[in-house]
Amino acid sequence: MIGRLNHVAIVVPDLEAASKTYATTLGAQVTAPVDLPDHGVTTVFVELPNTKIELLHPLGEGSPIAKFLENNASGGMHHVCYEVDDILAARDKLVSEGARILGDGEPKTGAHGKPVLFLHPKDFCGTLVELEQV
Ligand code: CO
């Protein structure tokens, strides 16, 4: 069901410093920061030949990643995102397998303007999983 790894998301305490680490130290191509107020995050994408790294920093009050940063002051891996062809079919299969979908179970528009869902980390080896329809 799942296809390519779309991205790995890393929450960072300092987006500018993290961008510089990836651009200069690691020599990767990084995008300019983009604010996503609906998601409560600012994102920078690191473009790799086979996937992307999504650097995330909290934006505004009540950001969904604020707590994560409180618990992981130097940042850390937040989620992995797998591509699926049909997100509703994927959701229905997962629910039938007993997996838990976060939120109300309906796809939201993600950072790339595509429908996404998040799956409960306890059902997936302790890792928050995002599914994105491509
Ligand atoms: Co993501």
Image (tube, grey):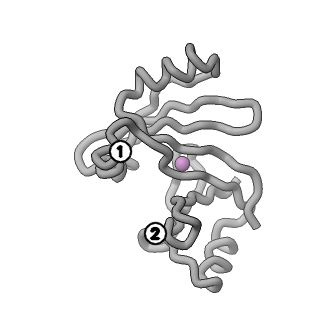
Q: Which mark is residue 102?
A: 2
**Vertical comparison of 73 with 134: above or below:** above
Residue wearing tag 1: 72
Q: Residue at x 59, y 52 (%)?
A: 80
Quarter holding the N terminus is bottom right
Task: State the residue lying farthest toward the left.
Answer: 61
Query: Tag count in the figure?
Result: 2
The spot of residue 49 in percent (x, y) is: 75, 31
User: Could you tell whether 112 is left or right of 61 in the image?
Assistant: right
Drawn side of residue 107 relative to residue 82, left or right: left
Q: Residue furthest top?
A: 24
Query: Alpha-carbon neighbours of circle 2 within 10 Å: few (<14), some, or many (≥20)?
Result: some
Q: Position of residue 50 (x, y in %)?
A: 76, 37
Residue drawn at x 44%, y 39% as measured from the top left: 56
Q: Secondary structure at mark 1?
A: loop
Q: Position of residue 46 (x, y in %)?
A: 59, 30
Which image quadrant for residue 58? top left
Which residue lies at the image location 30% right of the left edge and 51% below the top edge? 67
Q: Looking at numbered disc 2 in the image, what kind of residue is underneath it?
A: Leu
Q: Amino acid at mark 1?
A: Asn
Check disc 1: other Cα within 10 Å, few if <14, some if 14-19, many if 20+. Answer: some
In the picture provided, is 31 more to the left or to the right than 62? right
Q: Image height check: is 59 above or below 121? A: above
